[in-house]
Amino acid sequence: MGRNMGRIQKDQRKTKKSYSLSYESVAFLENISRKRRGASVSSVLDEMIQNIRREEARQSLGRAVDAYYSSLSDQEAKELEEWGSFAMSQFSAEDRGR
C-alpha cells in the first residue's frame, strides 16, 4: 500500500495541459511511443523535456566551472594543479588508469 501511495502522490504532481503541435511533431511523438511499446505520448514528451532540462543544467554547470577557473590568478591555478598532482599520487597506478 505504501508503494501505491507514493505513485499516486507523484502522479498528482502532473498538470494536464493542451498544446498545439504540428502534424509532423505529433507523428514523431506517436512513432516513438509505439517503438517504446505502450509508453504514452505524454511520457515520451515529458522524457524529452527532462533530457533537455538535464542537458541545459549540465551546460550551465560547465560554464560556471569554466568561469571559476578563468577567474583564478596564475598562483591560484598553480596551487590547484599542485594539489591535484598530490591527490593523484595517492592513488595506485591501477586506480589512476580506471
Image (cartoon, grey):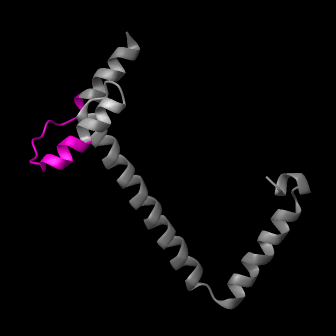
- Which residue is depicted at the point 28% across and 37% down? 31
The x, y position of residue 80, in whole percent, is 72, 76
- Which residue is depicted at the point 84% across and 52% down? 95
- Which residue is depicted at the point 34% across and 42% down? 47
> Does the rendering let one see residue 28?
yes
The x, y position of residue 18, in whole percent, is 9, 41
Residue 5, picture quadrant:
top left
User: Which sits in the foreground, 75 or 26?
Assistant: 26
In the rendered image, the residue lying farthest to the top is: 1
Q: Is 59 included in the stretch rendered in magenta?
A: no
User: Which sits in the foreground, 67 or 26?
Assistant: 26
In the shown orientation, is residue 87 left or right of residue 44? right
Residue 79, picture quadrant:
bottom right
Decide: is 66 above or below 97. below
In the rendered image, the residue lying farthest to the bottom is: 74
In the shown orientation, is residue 50 left or right of residue 24? right
The total number of labels drawn is 0
Decide: is 65 above or below 46. below
In the shown orientation, is residue 34 left or right of residue 75? left
The x, y position of residue 82, in whole percent, is 80, 76
The magenta-colored residue range is 12-28
- Which residue is depicted at the point 39% across and 14% down? 2
Q: Quadrant of the N terminus?
A: top left
In the shown orientation, is residue 32 left or right of residue 21? right
Q: Is 25 included in the stretch rendered in magenta?
A: yes
User: Which sits in the foreground, 58 or 42?
Assistant: 42
Decide: is 79 above or below 97. below
Residue 7, picture quadrant:
top left
